[in-house]
Image: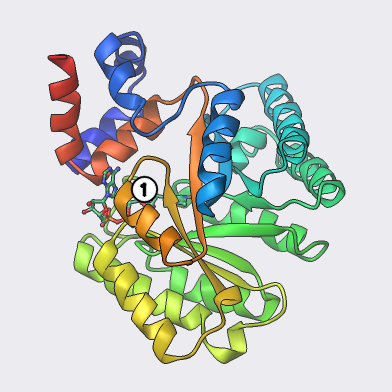
Amino acid sequence: MRKVLLAGSTNPWLRNRATRTAFVRRSVSRFMPGEQIDDAIRAAAELKPRGITTILTKLGENLTAVEEAEEVTLHYLDVLDRIATAGLDAEISVKPTQLGLDLDRALCERNLDRLIARAEQRNNFIWIDMEGSPYVDPTLDLFRRTRAKTARIGIALQAYLYRTEKDVESLVPLGARIRIVKGAYLEPSEVAFPRKGDVDANYFKLCTRLLAPDARKPGALLHIATHDIPLAGRLAAYIAQQNMPSSAYEFAMLYGIQRGQQMRLASEGRRLRVLISYGEYWFPWYMRRLAERPANVWFVVRTMFG
Ligand SMILES: Cc1cc2nc3c(=O)[nH]c(=O)nc-3n(C[C@H](O)[C@H](O)[C@H](O)COP(=O)(O)OP(=O)(O)OC[C@H]3O[C@@H](n4cnc5c(N)ncnc54)[C@H](O)[C@@H]3O)c2cc1C
């Protein structure tokens, strides 16, 4: 089921049909407060009184024209301004391919530099998402290059990839902000652990490595980005056992997923950041969310019948 849904996520015919279908649009609203930035800002403002901070991300990937990358960059520059005006503790997360990585690497770097410059002005922070495995090297290059100039940059790394352990090790000396995720793309067994048990074990290992004393440098922060409650619980127990300061880590989850757990973490006073997605190009992202939990497909079917 996971493979079928992930293969469907890149199918243009399916995308065209699904995004025009009312019941699919209705079921998407569970994970996305709306298609516009105003919807995301409103959702972030609603979470603020509960002590939940946010990350905003505009959906879209693999652009085909330089003009689109410019549009995305201008959009995010405006988002950084809007966040400041709204007085929110909200960061932004961008996909390198949204900034033009596939089209022209130098252009992508320039666009990221523009966002970093605005983040400096607005006292904000930029995350780089990790996309499919062919993008890992260029994304790490982009991150390292930017991290050499500023601490206002963080990167997502995927626990399902065999290589991530080495990548983490290479980033430890930088004192980087790192978001550990399990990984959302369809990857072959040559590059990624096929079994969930192995991914979970690697997730725990990567997080504990990033919490080790030599990794806790100024500017370092671990984002424990998972909805896996037992795994997050094991990490929380490890953190308590090690007497770790709360400044060393944050939990992170996606808007609309495990809401109960989100409220529980917030009411316990844990640092939690919720990633809010918005935008019109939601189909591949939505299919990845369905693939993460096939039970969601039944939710879609139920929505179909009202
Ligand atoms: C803040 C954040 C940022 C992310 N950034 C990236 C990124 O840059 N690159 C990338 O590849 N991936 C990213 N992801 C997605 C990630 O890789 C996983 O695909 C996703 O988080 C599901 O894995 P899990 O850790 O929650 O564990 P899983 O083992 O998949 O899920 C654990 C449990 O959580 C619940 N759950 C998980 N997903 C869903 C869902 N969609 N709907 C309902 N319940 C669900 C279910 O109860 C499930 O049993 C990000 C995730 C988060 C939270």
Query: In the picture shown, does residue 236 fall above or below 112?
Result: below
Residue sitting at 44 percent across and 75 percent down?
207
| Residue found at x 71% / y 23% | 71
Q: Residue at x 51, y 29 (%)?
A: 278
Residue at disc 1, secondary structure: loop
Q: Quadrant of residue 93?
A: top right
62 on left or right of 225 = right
Answer with left or right where residue 305 lies relative to residue 58.
left
Location of residue 166 in the rendering, given as x and y in whole percent from the top left corner: 49, 75
Decide which of 161, 35 is in the foreground and name it: 35
Q: Determine which quarter of the picture holds residue 163.
A: bottom left
Quick one: label 1, few (<14), some, or many (20+) residues within 10 Å?
some
Location of the N terminus (image quadrant): top left
Quarter of the image with the C terminus in it: top left
Q: Residue at image x 68%, y 82%? A: 217
Disc 1 marks a residue whose amino acid type is Ala
Q: Is residue 26 above or below residue 276?
A: above
**Can residue 269 be seen by looking at this rendering?**
yes
Q: Position of residue 193 (x, y in %)?
A: 28, 63
Q: Which residue is mark 1?
A: 184
Residue 258 appears in the rendering: no
- The yes-or-no answer for disc 1 within 8 Å of ligand 1 is yes
243 on left or right of 84: left
- Residue 16, how many percent across, how many down? 36, 12
Compared across the picture, whether 154 is left or right of 301 comes to: right
Q: Position of residue 24 (x, y in %)?
A: 28, 18
